[in-house]
Every structure is written in C-alpha cells, then in structure tokens.
Image (cartoon, rainbow, N blue to C red):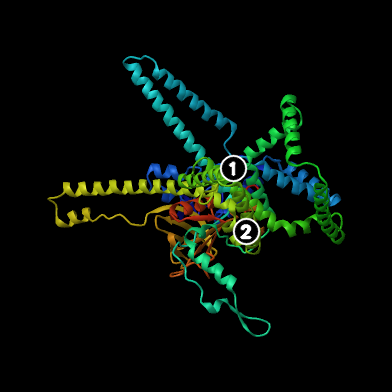
Amino acid sequence: MVYNGIDNNAPVDAPDADDLSPPSTIQKLKSSAKSKTKHILNIDATESGDAKVEKTLSGAARKELESPAFNSAKFLKKSEPGPKGFRDRTSTAFKVTANAIVHPKDTIKSSSSRVTASHLAKSRPVTSKEADLEFLQAHDDLDEARERQAQDLFGDEIEAEEGNVAYQKSRIEGLELSRRNMRVAWVTGRHVQRVRVVPNLTQPTLPPPSYFEEEDDCGYTRFRWQDWLGYKVLSLTHQFTARYIDDFAQLPYDEDTLRLHLERVLVVSAPLQEIASSAMRLYTWEDPWRTGIGCLMYALIQNYFYPHTIANLRAAQARSSDHEATARKIDELMDRHGAQNWIEPFLQEVGPSLQAILSDTANTIEAMNNLYHFRNVSASMATFWLLASGLIFSLFADANLVISLFWAGLGGLFFFLWPIATLHPRYRLLVSPIKWLVWDVPTHAELCFQYLQERSNFVKEAIFAGRYKQRQKAEQIAIRHVYDSDDSFHSALDIQLDENKDILSFGCTFENRPGHFIISTNTVRFQSRIASDKHTFTHPLQNMIEISKQRTRSSLLTPIVKHSTGMDKLEIRFRRTGQVADLKGDVMEPQIVTLENMIGRDKAFNALIGFSGLRWQHVQQRSSGDVDWKGASHGE
C-alpha cells in the first residue's frame, strides 16, 4: 500500500553486496530498521504529512503556509554539536556517569546551571546582526536612489531611477515582512504554549440568590454580599473585562515556566537594561565631568527635600526592624531544612507569586512597547489623552486638591484593590492601575495572533481566487458547448466548489489510531488511515475553546523519537453544542481531543489560531509536565 509516497509493503533495505564490513553492515541495518520503526509508529519527522493537501492550493497560499509565521519549528530548530562516533559517545557517556557517581551534588548543580544558561542564552530573538545590517543597508540604498531621482535627469534615466526606487521600496517591504514572520515564529514557537478563546462577549446571567446563601456556625442563613457584588460587577463589565480574567485561581508553580517568564522579561527590557548600563557608567566615573555634575545635583536635591533630622533617624530604625523580621523568617527556613536545602522550600513558597509577578511584568513591558509604537492606535491615543489630562489637571488645579486625590487613590489601592488582587489572583489585572493605562494594548503574543489571522485571511483569499478562476473556466466551457446536449450543458454549469476547503494535513495518532489531522476553512477533523475505522471526529473551528502544546513522557521509544517530532502532542478542547462560558470564562466538561506523535505540531498550532478567526488569550500551561521547552531534555 502506498500512502503519501511511502510504500508500506516495501522490504527492509539490504546492505550493498560490495560493502560487507561488519561496522558498515550493522550501521546500515540499524539505520534501515530505525527508519522502518519510525514509519510504523507514525513518527517519521521527514514526512510532512500535508504535501498531498497543499498540492491542491495555489502557489501563493502554499508559500504563505510555509513562511516562518506558520511553520516556526522549521526555522527555529537548531541541532547542538556533540560527539559523532560510537567510540566518542561511549567515552563521553562513561565519563559523565563516573562523574555523577563520584560527585552527585556537583553534577546536579552543573546540569541545572547548563540547562538554565542554555535557555536564557537563546532568549535573543532570531533577527541576527546580519539581518539588521541588511535591513539598514536596504534603507541606505533607498535613500541613495531617491537622491539620484531628485537630480536633473532626462529620458530613460528618469524611468530607470523610478524603477530603482520602486525596487528598493519592494525590497524593504519584503525584509520587513520577513522580520515580522521571524518574530512571530520566535514568540509563538518558544513562549506561547497554551491559548484559550476569550469568552463570548454577550452578558452572562447572574447566579440565583440561593448561590450566595450559606449557613453560619449557629445555623442561620447568611447572604454573601461581597460575592454577589463581585459577580454583579463582572456581569455588567463582562464585555471588556473577559479577556483579562485568568483561568487559574492560583497559577501553578513550575520552574520551566518561571524560566520562560524570566526570559521574556530579559528580552523586552532591553531599553531598561541600556538605562541601567548608562547608570553604571555614571557611578563608575567613566566620564568624570558628567558624574561630578550628577553627584552635585543629587547632594543639593537630597539635602533640600530630605534633611537629616531625628524623625528620619527613627523612621530608619523602624525600617531596619522590619528587615530583621524578614531575616528571622529565612533563619527559620534554614533551621528547618538545613543550610544546604532551604532554597527549594523557599522557592516553592514564593514561586507562584514570583511567577505571576514576572509574567505580569513581561506583559506590561511588552504592552508599553507596543503602546509607544502605536500597535493599537485607538488604545494608544486614549492612554496618551488620559496622561495628558492628568498632567494638565495637576498643573492648573489646586495643589491641596491634587495631593488629597493622590492620597485618596493610594488608600483605595491599598485597602480595596490590592486585597482583591491578592485574595483572587485571577482578577488581579482588572484591579491593576498599570493595566488600566495600557488597557486593550496588545502584548507581543496577541500581536502575533493578529498577524497570523491576517495572513490566514490572505491564504483564504488566494484559495477563493483560485476557486473563482475555476468557476470562470467552467462557465466558458459551458458557453463553448452551448449547442451540445442539455446534460453536458448542466454538468458544466453545475460544477460547484465545496464550501469547506482542506488547507493543511498533519500526520498523527488519535486514540492509538494513525491518521491525519486535517484543517479546513471551517472545520477540523481526524481521518484514520483505516477506512472503516470509527475513531474519527469533526468539529467546527468556532467550537474551539483551548489549544495547548504538550510533550510525551519518557518511554522505551524515547531513543527513537527524541530527535524527531514523535514526542509532540497537541491538545484541543471544544465546547459541546449549546455550551457557553460562565462569568469566569470556564466551560464545564468540554470535549478534549489529544493528538499524539504529531508531525508539524507547531505549524498546526499556529494555523488553528489563524484560520479560526477567534480572539485568543495567552495563558499558562495546566501542569508542569506540559511545558515544551525548545532544546530541553523533556525528561529524557
């Protein structure tokens, strides 16, 4: 049987007759058996699984689907150099094993450090220095072409320079598109592991009063007014607050996720790092004049606004006692777990809060960066108008009134907003004044989702343009044969193109059945390789509520699939017919589909985001084992 160009009944390749040396024979048999096993298990990474479907698309659509924005794994996958020969691998493994036996603690620490360093070293976006130089050179060439065009030219010279300017503009547009594609590939391929659909914007119904009633210790019924008020506010503001409600009451702590958030902060805080570097040059006296002026200004301002008094000394002593209290708490941890083992319990205690802070910090810096670049013009204008209004009010209003409003706002933040953010973390963004300033300003991930949907619309337009040409061709055939029989006339005009057009296909297994996951313009489905197999499904794209990348745990097949896509999984959650999300954005008992051994999983992930047309929200993985680090060991 031949499927997608592979003969399932083909015999195992035999070694060449003229090369019968034992190493060569063993190597060839091993390679042949390995490739055959990978194909039987449907984990052959060399076979894309979607070539047959893509052949039916136009050239522009195929080119777009192979761009880095969709096929991120193809452009981001890097192979680490290592020992090649069997002898080298054996020697290296022996040395590592011996060192682990002799120095177990040092081995664990060095391994953890190498993993963290390798992840953070890859935190630089894929736009390299050479790409930046090429982009700058293209702008220089355009400036030179415009200067030549502005000179006194005649005849063919004018037309030639106009063509040169047009060429340089198209070149810059192509480079900008390429850079944007690579940024989308970087963000979606490395940082986005799970997304969910923003809940429906229709106003949800409020729970009945009995939902808020409970009995106290004395048996009397008590009405929970605080919960009722919170639900009432959520119900009234659901249209514009649903996209900022987290799906976890408490974010699950995970070291890999913490690394991801730290990596994002390092990447997006590059301008702040430059400010810190400038401050370091200031206090290291690299420029004595500049540092001296800064020191003099600091001394004058500090002595004018903060004179040294007895009250200040008492306040300093009070702050010192607070620091000592914190130190006593760490001392308790050290006494309880030992001087060498107290860090891990400490991280387990503060990890969830630290993880949420890093995530919100990365999102805020990304939103501020996009605010500055007017990625969402209306949101940026609203923010700048609000800041300008506040500045004008503070300049012309009474100083006592401004100070009173400031302290009133600070009190409301401390006594009302922070308690909600601490006790109900999933609503922390709704009560964050910083988030109010960048409300509706997209993060990098949300910008990538918008870009994927723009390019998906381009692919759909290319598909429908091809269908329109086919329709025109059918009508021309019908007109040319107008004097033929009625049957031939109607058969030509009745060539109707399917409403649901297949776009991409990916090899995978579903419930241990090998087959293909097919993405169409309106639906997704699984098609088993066995024609009579009933283990299939078909769902509308609009019914998706969540997509997450996952990774198969270690098994006996790990040596076979660890360098392929055989360990990649994709989990999709669909809402059942008639189901709607509640006030928290949750859908009870969704239908869960898990596709294993998936070839081109990242491409399918991005394609589902793009072709669905839904509004997606970047959220954290559900469990620690699901985070898919590029280049990590995944438990091998």
Whether residue 315 is visible here, answered yes or no, is yes
Q: Answer whether residue 636 is visible to the viewer in this image.
A: no
**What type is the residue that disc 2 sits on?**
Gly
Q: In the figure, is residue 191 to the left or right of 326?
A: left
Among the 4 quarters of the image, the one containing residue 366: top right
Residue located beneath label 2 in the image: 412
Question: What residue appears at the point 42 percent right and 29 percent down from the top-left corner?
Answer: 169
Comparing 28 with 488, the one in front is 488
Where is residue 325 shown, x and y percent of the image? 82, 57
Q: Residue at x 21, y 49 (%)?
A: 475
Tell me which corner region of the image, top left, top right, bottom left or bottom right, holds residue 522.
bottom left
Splitting the image into 4 quarters, where does residue 430 fall?
Answer: bottom right
> In this view of the protein, which residue sits in the foreground, 375 or 237?
237
Looking at numbered disc 1 in the image, what kind of residue is underneath it? Asp
Q: Quick one: label 1 or label 2, which is nearer the N terminus?
A: 1
User: How many other residues sit within 10 Å of disc 1, few (<14), some (14-19) or many (≥20)?
Assistant: few
Say if 202 sits above or below 630 in the image: below
In this view, 53 is above or below 232: above
